[in-house]
Image: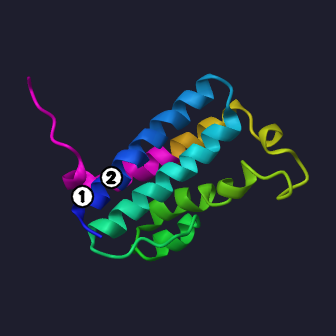
Amino acid sequence: MNRVAAAKWLKQALHDLEMAGRNVGIGGYDTAAFLAHQSVEKLLKALLAAQGRAVPKTHFIDELAGQLDLPPEVQVHIDGLTADYMLSRYPDVSDQVPYEQYDEALANEKVRAARSVFALLKERYADLMPESRDD
């Protein structure tokens, strides 16, 4: 992988994070949780790609995080999002239908956790951000 690929992963991660927040606003609480997870997954894959490492084909963000030597304050947010890849989508993972498991408060918590991961790791991906132009 290279920096171009890493920048693509990051761009999609930022989009997913934005869409997670928007879904809270329209009552798509399960979708918000899923997209919060996805945004962090893609951010971690961007960081791996930026290091020239292969991007694993996995959705387990705790495993991805383990490859990046992240500080505990990041890991706690990742741990809180890990299960949402499955719980927010598949009705056979728990006793409840996925959309019935999430409410506004929980969805907001998931989006806040994802935003915290981005904020805490900003120094690691800042150089992948497109430069803003003053036109």
Instruction: Report which residue position mark 2 lands on.
Output: 8
The C terminus appears in which quarter of the rendering? top left
Q: Crowding near pointer 2: few (<14 within 10 Å), some, many (20+)?
A: some
The N terminus appears in which quarter of the rendering? bottom left
Left or right of 52? Residue 99 is right
Q: Is residue 98 above or below residue 55?
A: above
- Magenta-drawn segment: 114-135
Amino acid at pointer 1: Val
Q: CA distance from mark 1 to mark 2?
A: 6 Å
Instruction: Report which residue position mark 1 lands on.
Output: 4
Amino acid at pointer 2: Lys
Residue 100: where, in percent of width, then height?
83, 38
Rendered image quadrant of residue 68: bottom left
Rendered image quadrant of residue 109: top right
Q: Residue at x 46, y 60 (%)?
A: 73
Residue 104: where, in percent of width, then height?
69, 31
Q: Nearer the viewer, residue 7 or 73?
A: 7
Mark 1 near mark 2, Cβ–Cβ under 8 Å?
yes
Residue 14: where, in percent of width, then height?
39, 43
Q: Residue at x 53, y 51 (%)?
A: 38
Q: Is residue 60 above or below residue 94?
A: below
